[in-house]
């Protein structure tokens, strides 16, 4: 069936490639061969970042650089060896990519899975914006990212990929919303971040000993007590499958259900866990942070929602077809760590 290219939806990889070719998306350096994903574009840090004393939004009529003058404390050079972003601090970094979107095209950003799994809070900023992560239709200008490590200090450099951008036409409808529960039946049910660990190099894959950064969790009677202000990696009860003509975003549940937040990242490309990519169902990894009070989590308890949206057409490549660290995953730490043994 021929797709309706004017219908609302998330743009697939070939449409993103076309935006790059026409100059709607440009970069300070050549694009990487694997930068375009099935329904998203990885964004790369530029050469400079700033330690700031407060998070901010520029608001209508103001640019990010104008607001930086009010809050910047010092500048970091991300070239050469990069720089350490310390936990508990807030930074603004420039991105290499710049947008000149055509009419009718807007965008939304999410942290990459590997970013969320090391508890680095990341949000996109654009000039004149009144909301994080959302890029207005026909936006013309630079992009920046707010970086706020929570549990671990991290090393990043120019070219490091912390978040990804979805391009969309119109307002894609929600095709379905699915509840996601937590699995607390396994002997190894999750991990809790160590508070006084070393620095994680965000470009070093399979290079860190997980025991230096994480504690293993063994639930009792299908329950797990979440301690306030601690960070946990857990797995979904259900396998997650994303159809090839859809993408999904994992969103937090209503806070009235529990005093915790799930999933910083939350974007699933088409083909994740799908039969066509030889991976029938993959667990969703849950990044969980409790708030101000202890909370007793039970096996199967609903902790998040998956919101499915349509693509404008079938992507020319699907998630995991050429290999992926997370396709077919169960409970799994980020790609920065060696396997847990």
Image: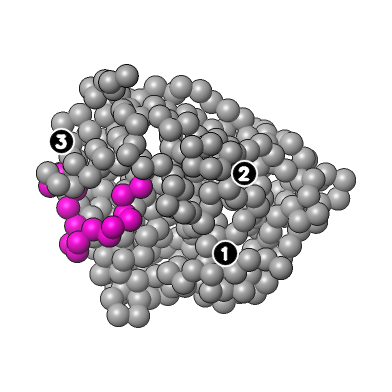
Nearer to us in this view, 234 or 314: 314
Give the secondary structure at mark 1: loop
309 inside magenta stretch: no
Using the rendered image of the protein, determine whether residue 54 is visible from the camera's viewpoint.
no
Q: For mark 1, does the 10 Å Cα neighbourhood hold few (<14), some (14 to 19), or many (20 or more) residues?
A: many
Real-space Cα separation, disc 3 to disc 2, in angstroms = 37 Å
Q: Residue at x 38, y 53 (%)?
A: 163
- The first of marks 2 and 1 along the sequence is 1
Q: Which mark is residue 151?
A: 1
Q: Which residues are magenta?
A: 23-37
Q: In the image, what residue occupies the spot 76% across and 46% down? A: 184
Say which label, 3 or 2, has the lower sequence index. 3
Mark 3 or mark 1: which is in front? 3
- Circle 3 — which element? loop
Residue at x 22%, y 48% (from the top left corner): 127
Indicate the position of residue 327 as horizontal and vertical percent values.
53, 49
Tell which of 167 and 311 is nearer to you: 311
Asked if one can make out residue 29 in the rendered structure from this viewpoint, the answer is yes
Marks 3 and 2: which is nearer the front? 2
Q: Which residue is mark 2?
A: 283
In the rendered view, tell whether residue 2 sits above or below residue 101.
above
């Amino acid at each position: 069936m021929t797709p309706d290219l004017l219908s609302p939806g998330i743009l697939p990889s070939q449409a993103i490639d076309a935006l790059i070719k026409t100059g709607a998306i440009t970069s300070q350096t050549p694009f990487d061969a694997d930068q375009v994903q099935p329904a998203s574009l990885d964004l790369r840090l530029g050469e400079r970042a700033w330690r700031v004393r407060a998070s901010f939004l520029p608001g209508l009529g103001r640019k990010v650089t104008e607001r930086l003058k009010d809050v910047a404390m010092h500048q970091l050079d991300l070239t050469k060896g990069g720089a350490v972003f310390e936990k508990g601090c807030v930074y603004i970094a420039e991105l290499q990519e710049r947008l000149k979107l055509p009419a009718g095209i807007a965008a939304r950003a999410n942290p990459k899975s590997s970013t969320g799994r090391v508890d680095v809070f990341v949000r996109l900023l654009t000039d004149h914006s009144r909301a994080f992560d959302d890029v207005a239709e026909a936006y013309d200008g630079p992009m920046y990212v707010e970086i706020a490590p929570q549990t671990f200090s991290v090393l990043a450099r120019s070219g490091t990929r912390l978040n990804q951008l979805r391009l969309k036409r119109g307002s894609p409808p929600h095709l379905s919303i699915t509840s996601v529960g937590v699995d607390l039946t396994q002997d190894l049910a999750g991990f809790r971040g160590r508070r006084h660990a070393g620095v994680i190099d965000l470009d070093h894959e399979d290079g860190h000993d997980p025991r230096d950064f994480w504690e293993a969790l063994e639930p009792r009677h299908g329950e797990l007590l979440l301690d306030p202000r601690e960070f946990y990696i857990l797995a979904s009860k259900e396998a997650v499958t994303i159809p090839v003509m859809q993408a999904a975003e994992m969103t937090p549940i209503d806070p009235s259900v529990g005093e915790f937040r799930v999933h910083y990242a939350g974007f699933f490309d088409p083909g994740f866990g799908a039969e066509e990519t030889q991976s029938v169902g993959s667990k969703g990894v849950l990044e969980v942070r409790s708030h101000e009070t202890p909370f007793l989590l039970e096996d199967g308890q609903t902790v998040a929602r998956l919101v499915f949206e349509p693509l404008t057409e079938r992507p020319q490549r699907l998630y995991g077809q050429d290999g992926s660290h997370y396709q077919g995953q169960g409970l799994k730490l980020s790609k920065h760590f060696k396997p847990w043994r």
